[in-house]
Amino acid sequence: MKSKVNRELPDDLMNKLDYKPFETTEIGHPEIQRVAPKVHVSTGDDKIVDSIKQVVADTVKDGMTISFHHHFRNGDFVFNQVMRVIIDAGIKNLTLAPSSLTGVMNDMVIEAIKAGTITNITSSGMRGSLGDFVSHGGLKNPVIFRSHGNRARAIEHGDIKIDVAFLGVPSADRLGNANGMEGNAVFGSLGYALMDAQYADQVVLLTDNIVDYPNTPASIKQTQVDYVVKVDKVGDPDKIGSGATRFTKDPKELKIASMVNDVITHSPYFKDGFSFQTGSGGAALAVTRYLRQSMIDNQIKASFALGGITKPTTDLLNEGLVKKVMDVQDFDKGAADSMHTNGNQQEIDASWYADPDNKGAMVDQLDVVILSALEIDTKFNVNVMTGSDGVIRGAIGGHQDAATGKLTIISAPLVRGRIATVVPDVTTVVTPGDSVDVLVTEFGIAINPKRTDLIAALSNIPGLPVYKIEDLQKMAEKRVGTPKPLEYTDRTVAMIEYRDGTVIDTVKEVKD
Amino acid sequence: MEIKKTAIAGTLESSDIQLMISQADSGITIDLQSDVKKVFGDQIEAVITTTLNNMGVTAAKVKAVDKGALDCVIKARTIAAVQRAAETTDKPAWEVL
């Protein structure tokens, strides 16, 4: 069978895993039955446990689904400590269901797969040695990749049933009231972990900082927590974020950023009260600075900024140019600190942020969104998952979710080194072209032909050449040459879900 | 053109290629390292071989470390490495350019 973006899907796996192929970006108005977790009743006075070993012995059994969050990013000390104990306990056949996997976890995941401890994985993404391992067939069952909004949906539906959630926090009290803002290894919003705290049958908090009861503000509440484990260190604060986010000096990125700003300011959405989401890449940060000046010049204020938050965005909040920041995660220390001090920066969970099966998610209200791409094809389909060698090296993140915004801009250079970004067909379709509106490269922009309104609004702007996306693709190919097609085996190593839980594409094992 | 000594051209910067050419008894052998080898490996080796042939080099060992160079860069670095290896840099072979 095929998904609507014309990708062949393996019938056997689709049937075995009870999947439907991707049809449409429209969610409609279905009625959804959500699930509820088990509750192990307690007065709360017996939650403190001395060791990870003891809590693992009490909670984790063969065949269970366990979860973690990735808010500590590459400064995470929790995942490896817990997995070490689980592997050594000889537990088998676990499903690993973290919000995402960061580089610091790679070696431990590979060891756990080889030991038979982990036999299934669902994640937002994976990179480095783990992506390489999976792409070369290291895991028998296909990895299920889900966006942040789709993970929330899958948890609420019971598609992901978390037995035990291991959640690291920089501060908690003895009953489990916890936040990500106080302590040593602070990361700000606990957005992704809030799903696990709410829906896992058993919730284990790990912290290096047990504070007086009751701990406020409480992002995770005592009503959700079964165990609190004291560990030496939950994370390395220097590796959580990039510290002070530096402003790019790369002329190519600056040119792209300035053109993205031109697209935004000449669109019908740039008016008082508009909303936006930017990513954390160099060009995206630069856009925020250009946008700031345009907002001041035109006396326009934004109603909210959404998503992964960086300091340039919280600076706009402090200047009054943005009224609210809706914060599911913080990419740097400035943004994390700001959540602690500024009442207009609201912590939101992944469901509120982006879950399609909701009574309204924040992304549904989004006007302008700027996203990146490893590849984009002439159908405007975007790949953020596999590299030019076909190997897994990315993450869906909130890409599919945010792309439902009213003006979705993909900012990307035409070529990177010898690799074309604009291609005839992307290696892996993650975000369907139907939800993408404008591509901005350093040479010019291309507008999705379905958006005749944007073609009219953006076609006669000085310094903003408009091309057909096919022409941009040919320009790229003329520069770098025609690559030899990648070779794969017949084996599927990963399924890419669309945000509604259908399958949009798969990743095959690479041949080499 | 005869390779007289081992010579290097190019850097390991992004979008460049570093070529080391040394003597060989006969034939051209290319040892290529590249992140894009899967999709552009054949093309890179073809550009190096053609450039060597055009310069009349029939015996050489080439070690190439590619960082995503375009064909024009590969050709230029190959010419520079050959002229250094053949000790002809004082008489650039303009006709092959």
Image (spheres, coloured by chain):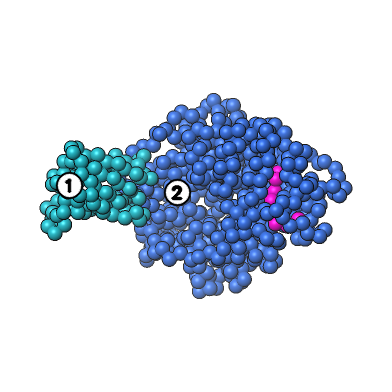
Chain colours: A blue, B cyan
Tell me the residue at 50%/65% (across/down). A246
User: Residue A311, how many percent across, how many down?
Assistant: 57, 65
Magenta-drawn segment: A165-172
The chain holding disc 2 is A
Q: Nearer the viewer, residue A95 or A282?
A: A95
Tell me the residue at 20%/49% (across/down). B5
Q: Is residue A97 left or right of residue A451?
A: right
Task: Indicate the secondary structure of the residue bearing disc 1.
Answer: loop
* Amino acid type at mark 1: Ile
Q: Quadrant of the C terminus of chain A?
A: top left
The picture quadrant where one finds residue B35 is top left
- Tag on residue B3? 1
The vertical placement of A134 against A396, above or below, is: above
Q: How many circles with numbers are drawn on the protein?
A: 2
The vertical placement of A246 against A472, above or below, is: below
Q: Nearer the viewer, residue A424 or B24?
A: B24
Residue B95 visible at all: yes
Residue B16 sits inside the magenta stretch: no
The picture quadrant where one finds residue A152 is top right
The residue at which mark 2 appears reads as A374
* Amino acid type at mark 2: Leu
The chain holding disc 1 is B
Does the magenta stretch mainly form a helix, a strand or a loop? Answer: strand
- Tag on residue A464? none
User: Residue A145, how many percent across, how many down?
Assistant: 56, 40
